[in-house]
Structure formats: structure tokens, C-alpha cells
Amino acid sequence: MESFIDRKGIDYYAPVAENQYAETGGKVAVMAVASNGQSIISEIPVIIGEAPVTISVEGQTVSTILTNGVEMYYLGVLEMNEYSAEAVAELVNGYAARMYMKTAALDKVSLAELIGKDPEAGKTYMIWAVPPSEAGIEYLPDDVIASVIKTAATVELKVSDITFEGATVSAIRKGCDVYYTGILDKPNYSPERVIDDLAYGGGTKQYSDYNGPLEGKVLDFLPKVIPGTTYVLWAIPYKEEKGYKTEELVAVEIPVPALTYDGTATININSVVTTVSSVSATITPGTDCYKFYYSYMKEQTLANYGTDKEVISYLIKNGDSSKEVENFERASLEPGTKGFFIAVALNEKGQLGSLVKVQADSKEISYNSSISVDVAIEAGTVSTTLTLTPTGNPEKFRYVHMKLSDFKNYPYWGNEEMVKQALIMNDNVTEIVAAELKNHQLVIEDIAFNSEYVLFMIAVDTDGNPSSTITKKEYTSAKPTYVRKDRDPDLWNASVPEVTIDKIEKDKFYTVSYTVKPKAACKVFYVFAGPADYLTGMYDEQIRYVMKNGVKQTTTYSGSVYGTLPTNINVTWMDEEGRFYEVSKTVVEAPAQ
């Protein structure tokens, strides 16, 4: 016999009538292997000629056609893992045979009616039939006729332990290996919307069953559950062919109970500290407090809420929550900002206590003319040492350190007043505590050699007030001693790190895995892998490029690069005496095909 396999099944074709040597019957054995490695073997006897009973399947219904003279036959259903022709023969030869006896053809009888219950989703069943035999003759496995029927794959969703904090949910695959999930508020959910979103890459792809909390980043991005919200968790089996249908979608509603306002739980806000750009406080659970919500609101924002209940509603939806003591800070405030720390506690039953408000205004800027800082700079090739000389006992220092060429671009555009405001407001600048410096020294690492830099620094007192003066310093980092391969071959060759190409793999492009091993004279090295045309300019410019864009290492390093070939593994290094070495370039060519 010949067979043909497509996505729907296997078709078998009898030999042509002229082939006198072909077999007229036999068994077809099919072994199915699931994604988890489990397998099952099914055998179906076949014989050339007109079958006395023909089984046909349409959707979830079964029909039979009887040839002339067939007035009785046996028909039943078994799950695929229970089916075998031998098992069926044993059934119809036993005392229970009458249970399976049929005296008329079936016309689109539902699978549920045949098995006496709703079929399980994603399950494969075997519809079997045995035609009548001569009286007294036992039925054999070869007498069994069978056909497969499979119910549609789905995902079983279950919900339990619903509280005001969330719920436990599960998603169990039924007949599918991969599926999508998502979570929406009930007003925003509709099957049609989900199907449309799937067409544009919506949904979270899942490869395993799930049992756990509703919130999180597994089923969807739901960072926290809002009490009083009804959520809809949906799922749909993945399929390779395009186009999903609403009837394939399963969904379950999760009504999260709302909090009530009849509790007496308390919360304490104390240890309030304010500066010109920040406010902070310690929030401590009080009596009967199981959990609390908290935030900071500017005075003009708080004025938009007419009642405490409205503010509490805002906290529940937008505030942070905790069950432990919280040291809360709101930074990057404008000087003189008026506002409040707000918090509300609730007990284990979800009963809210009273709203707590504590005023916390950031301070107005008050420049402190009695503090200042001077800076002495000792510039090296790869680091700069700043020695600070403070006056007036400042508590902190803030600084901006960058290449002079970068200062002329975004975000300062060469405007020193913009830098001053950033330092005053502690906005994207570096702040250090004076007491943490050793010998009043600060080391800035990984600078570029032979480059112009600018430093701006202010002092800050214990109240957060900045010094009235700003210190500005410009300097040029040191120019190193270069070791070039053509001029100092012995020195260069004696210390060049060894580059080994470990493996080259290809899919669409190449993945090159490599190892770089330094020699004893190498103190630190930098590795940059990429196309050869990335590395341009003179040898010193190439060294600078590799240092800036590569990875810094001191011991054996293993890396990989993905892209086209040829490509370069570029390495530059520095020895114990601080000398820099011309870039070593290992060219990786495409392997011969």
C-alpha cells in the first residue's frame, strides 16, 4: 500500500487492480510521539474490498454506512491510550457485547451521546466498529474497523482563593503545547478585541501550564491587583496558521472584592526630613495594620480631591503598598514645593482606617556662603584623582565630570547655568558623602587618555543647601606611552594576549565564540569584536575606540559575536608600567563550505 501524510492525517491507497502480487490486506501501525516524549502505538487492520461498516466523522459527530445485508454490528468509543484492536475484540467476545450492539446506521450522532458524557477537550478518541460474524465464531482483532476523532484543543482556566489582594489562578493545556494568555479589566474585555490584538502580536505566549498568583509578569503584565476590580483572564491555543476565532477563546472572570471604609487600622508617619529637592519620612504600621498604601502628593494635586475617600481611592489605584516599615523618599522636587505624605492602613479583612496626612514641603533654596570646595586634579591616562579641600564643613558634594566636547552638546549645550541648576537640584548629577571619602580624595575611573575634560562641583550643607559658589576645573588627561608592533616587535609580541576561536556556528548569520587569555606582563586588556571597518584612524585612535566600546578584563575572558564574516576580534592592553599597546586584530573568516 502507498501512504500520503498531510497536516490532517494519513491517507492510504490500495494497489491498482492489475498488481497481482500486492497484498490484499494487513495492518497499519501508527506511532504518535508527544512533545513530552510519551508515545502510543495504534494498529488498524485494512483489507481491500467494500467494508461492511464504514465510519465517517464530521466535526464532533459520527455516522456509519452499512452494506446490504448488515442488520447488526457493534460500535463503541475508547480513548486513544486505551484503544487496541485486541481490546475491542475482547469486548465484543465478552458478556458486555450487548452494550455495544447497534441495529441501524448512525446519522451524525454526537460524540457526547456515544460516550455518555461531554468529551474532554483536546482528547483523541477511537470510534470502533465490528461487523457481524457467523454464529459461534469468535471475533478477531482483524475484524475491527476504527476511525479517529479529536476534540478541539483548549486551555482550562480555574480560579481560587479570591481576596482583596488577588487570586490564585491556573491555566492547564488540553490538547495543545503552546497557548496565549492575557488579563484585562472587565469593561475593556471583549472576545473580538482579544482576537484583533492577537493579529497584531498581542497576548503572552506560554509553553507550560501555570498555577500561581494572578498578578505578576507571567500571564500578563499586571504589577498589582486593584481591589474592587473585576478582571478577565483569557487564553487561547496557539496555532501556526493565521487567524483566530472567538469560539476558540476561553475566559474567566475574577471579581476582586473592594475594600470597605469601616476599619480602625492605623499608620504612623514620622522622622520627616526635607531638603531643597527632596522630602523623606518613615512610615510604620500601627494598630491592627495588615497592609498600607502610601504616596506623596503635591498640595495643588491634593486640592483636586474633594474628600478623604477620593484620596484613599487614588492611593489604592496609584500608590505604593507595604506590610513592613518603609523609608519613603520623594526626590527631584522643585525648591519650595508644598505637599503631603499620605497613607491609609487596612486590616486583614480589607477594612480601611482613616486617611493620614503629614505636611512635607521641600525647602526654599538658601545658598550657604560659608561652605565651599576647591579641587586639585591629578590626571592619569585611565583615571583621575580629585583631592577636595572643603571649607565650612559641608556634608556632601555634587559634581558633573565629562569630556569638554560632550559638555558642548546635550544636555547642557555648553551652558554653565544649566549645570548649576542641575547641581542645585541634584538632577542627574553625582552626589557623594564627605565622610565616605578617604583623605578627601575621589578617583574617577575609565577616562579616555589624552582628552580634555571639565569638572563642575558644589558643596552641600546638612540641610541640603548648596554653596553659593560653584567650582569649575578643566584639564587634559595624560598622554600614554605607546608600544607599536612595527617599532617594538619584541615587547609587543611578548605581551600580546592570546586569542582562540573556540567555535563558529551558522544559522542566518554566524556566531563566533572566542577566548582571550592575557600574558603575565598584561595588567588589563580591552576586547571589542566587530566588522573590520568599525576600526578606523591611527593606532592611538584605534586604541581609544576599543577601550571605549569594548569590555575591560583582567583575567581570561570568553565572549561571542553574532553577525556576518569576516569579523575582527580586537584587543588592546596595558602593562604594569602603564604603557598602551597597538591593537591586536584577529580576523575570523567564514568557514569553507
Image: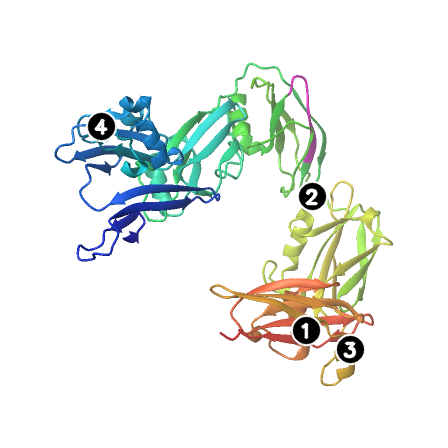
Mark 3 vs mark 1: in front: 3
Q: Distance between the residues labelled 4 and 1?
A: 96 Å
**Is 202 on the left or on the right of 169, as rendered?**
left
Most foreground residue, 549 or 475: 549
> Residue farthest to the bottom?
487
**For mark 2, does the 10 Å Cα neighbourhood hold few (<14), some (14 to 19), or many (20 or more) residues?**
some
Residue 528: x percent and y percent? 63, 68
Task: Report the disc number at residue 494.
Answer: 3
Instruction: Indicate the amino acid at tag 3.
Output: Ala
Of pointers 3 and 4, the one earlier in the residue sequence? 4
**Could you tell me which secondary element the residue under label 4 belongs to?**
loop
Of pointers 2 and 4, the one earlier in the residue sequence? 4
**Could you tell me which secondary element the residue under label 2 belongs to?**
loop
Q: How far apart are marks 2 and 4 (CA)?
A: 108 Å
Q: How far apart are marks 3 and 2 (CA)?
A: 60 Å
| Residue 111 occupies quadrant | top left
Instruction: Indicate the amino acid at tag 2.
Output: Ile
> Residue farthest to the front?
136
Which residue, given by chain and number where applicable, does mark 2 sit on? 365
Residue 76: x percent and y percent? 29, 29
Task: Report the disc number at residue 543.
Answer: 1
**Is 487 on the left or on the right of 29, as rendered?**
right
Decide: is 419 above or below 505. Answer: above
Instruction: Indicate the amino acid at tag 1.
Output: Ile
**Could you tell me which secondary element the residue under label 1 belongs to?**
helix
**For mark 3, does the 10 Å Cα neighbourhood hold few (<14), some (14 to 19), or many (20 or more) residues?**
few
